[in-house]
Amino acid sequence: MTSSDLENNGWVRTSRDGAVLTVTLDRADQLNAQTPATWTALAAVGASLDEDVRVVVLRGEGRSFSAGLDRSMFSADPSTDGGLGELGRLPAEESQERIRAYQAGFRWLRSPGIVSVAAVQGHAIGAGAQLALACDLRVLADDAQLRLPEATLGLVPDLTGTSTLMELVGYSRAMEICLTGRAVKAAEAQALGLANVVVPVAELEATVADLVAALTAVPVAASRATAALVRSAVRNDPAAQDAAERAAQVLRLQELVGGR
């Protein structure tokens, strides 16, 4: 893929190995800074998933996962396509609909049928942190740090980050991280539950590969049903979750014994 092809595709490239789809932010010279084209490209990847994809690995090329918004996005010039100045001058409903489309580039990472894994090295700031948080699992290199600085810039995290952070670390810690905009380094991220594992930078790729192998070794139907239960447990009350477990298990048992 040429440089111009990558730019036209939001600096997002994909590769496929059987049931594993790897999505790479490929703008290393800009620390994988994101633009609206990035989010459109990510949403398109999500929309194109087929039933055979079981695991999605999300990674950044080079030394950083993603340093967040491209600098051009901060322009007050309303003519800057997708910039904050343009969004601030649009009618509220139109601006919200545009952000809704941007959020679609993040939400698909928890689509039914897949498990998503973020491989995070270096900086994951703002939109970069929210992209890592959008995944089901995170493997961090020991040089990684996550930051949500939006509030310190007079903004808010609006790319699905508040809900995913809250699920992972709870109310008071999410509040503190969002309002201070401070860096959460790899060791703390693991202690808080933001990272499933932290490894030396040189071991990041191999560790992700081992995790992917373990995820794809589980029978596909059981894997997908279990992932669905874990996701529903976040919001279901105990009675609803118990019912969901019963229904899912009966389907598994029927398939195992050759029932309906």
Image (tube, rainbow, N blue to C red):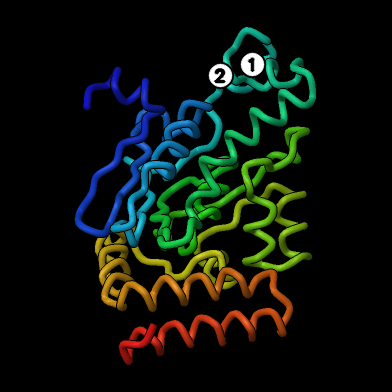
**Disc 2: CA contacts within 10 A as few (<14), some (14-19) or many (>=20):** some
Q: Position of residue 125 (x, y in %)?
A: 56, 43
User: In this rendering, is residue 37 above or below 202?
Assistant: above
| Residue beneath the point at 70% across and 21% down | 87
Q: For the residue marked with disc 2, what is the amino acid? A: Ser
| Residue beneath the point at 50% across and 34% down | 39
* Residue that badge 2 annotates: 72
| Residue beneath the point at 37% across and 66% down | 199
In front here: 106 or 240?
240
User: In this rendering, is residue 72 above or below 199?
Assistant: above
* Residue that badge 1 annotates: 75
Where on the picture, by quarter, is residue 259? bottom left
Is the N terminus in the top left, top right, bottom left or bottom right quadrant? top left
Where on the picture, by quarter, is residue 163? bottom right
SS label for mark 1: loop
Task: Kindly indicate whether the residue at mark 2 contacts the one at mark 1 (C-beta within 8 angstroms).
Answer: yes
Q: Position of residue 181 (x, y in %)?
A: 69, 47
